[in-house]
Image (cartoon, helix red, strand yellow):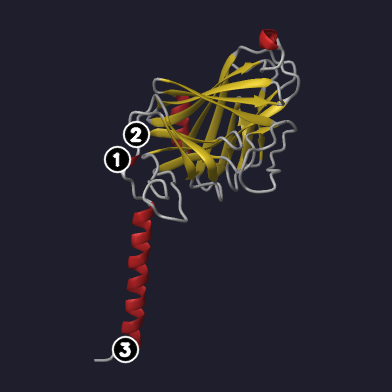
Amino acid sequence: MHDTPLNSCSLRMAAVLALSLVSATAAAKVNQSLLQQDFPFQGACIGAQFPAKNTAMKGLAIRLPGVADANVLFDTDLCRMAAGWTGGYINTRGVTFDGSHGGHPSIVGKQAFGTAVVPGVSLTGVFADGRKEPFGPTDASVVRWDGLHVAGDRVQLNYTVAGGIAVHEQPSARPAGGQTVYVRTFQLGGGKKGGIFARKAKTTTTFSLLLADVEGGSGRIDNGAAVVSANGVTTRIQATGLPKGASLKVEGGRVRLEVPTGTPPGGVFEVAVASGSDAEVAQAAGA
């Protein structure tokens, strides 16, 4: 019996569909035995779902205290918070995990926010990746990764801005109105130069922290919060306890926090991110 053109076409389509399903299954594959469940982070090259090409070459997938399945991805090369998500952790692809070549882990679940592959700190308000290659640390005169501390289920991220402003950041999450709110808690220090007296030094330059990039988004400041919308999804960012003169800025779909020159060290402030429909974001904000 000979295949008719219709039968041959159907067979080819079935084969493509089967291959796609196998590929999708492999991409989502998670071998829990390869992930330490009682430790707050996993380091690897890790991909996120958005913005485009959002991969942290030296990423930290951090489990967040406060909400059981909430996580963030921090990029130590660029000192940026690359993504936040719920509903899973990371898959176990790549040489380190399943022995496969040409792949790496990706986040598993529903992503809520993300940032472009640019440094997470800017001294001009403009964020651009000036590296010659798309890997390796960014310009240390702008921001330098200093490592982390772990205390129980909490992770503190440490980096230095402009060669002398120490930034200590602790990510967490909290439930609000049935939604997950991602929280970044900051404390500024004087940096390492100048010894003990540097702890009292005020910031010597204005700098900005990148908070979110919404592709195709348009935003505004609404009652002190940054609100950006695109494709039926709203991202709302609220800052509390900010130092005098610090403020949220919205440019298209990008949200940043600007910290002015002369900001004293020691104060603690936080940035909270919620994402979803207008109704879901309103519930989180009102909780």
Look at 24% across and 91% down and name the residue there. 1
Gap in Å between the C-alphas at discs 2 and 3? 53 Å
**Circle on res. 4:** 3
Which quarter of the figure has residue 160?
top right
Q: Quadrant of the C terminus?
A: top left
* Circle 2: element type: loop
- Judge whether 275 appears above or below 50 on screen: above
Which residue in the structure is indicated by mark 2?
36
Give the class, few, some or many, for how many residues have Cα within 10 Å of label 3's Cα (few <14, many ≥20): few
**Between disc 2 and disc 3, whose residue precedes?**
3
Q: Amino acid at mark 2?
A: Gln
Instruction: Please state the horizontal and vertical placement of residue 261, each as a whole percent of the image.
Output: 75, 20
Which residue in the structure is indicated by mark 1?
33
**Between disc 1 and disc 3, whose residue precedes?**
3
Which quarter of the figure has residue 186?
top right
Q: Amino acid at mark 3?
A: Thr
Q: Amino acid at mark 1?
A: Ser
Instruction: Please state the horizontal and vertical placement of residue 104, each as a whole percent of the image.
Output: 45, 49
Gap in Å between the C-alphas at discs 1 and 2? 7 Å
Give the class, few, some or many, for how many residues have Cα within 10 Å of label 1's Cα (few <14, many ≥20): few
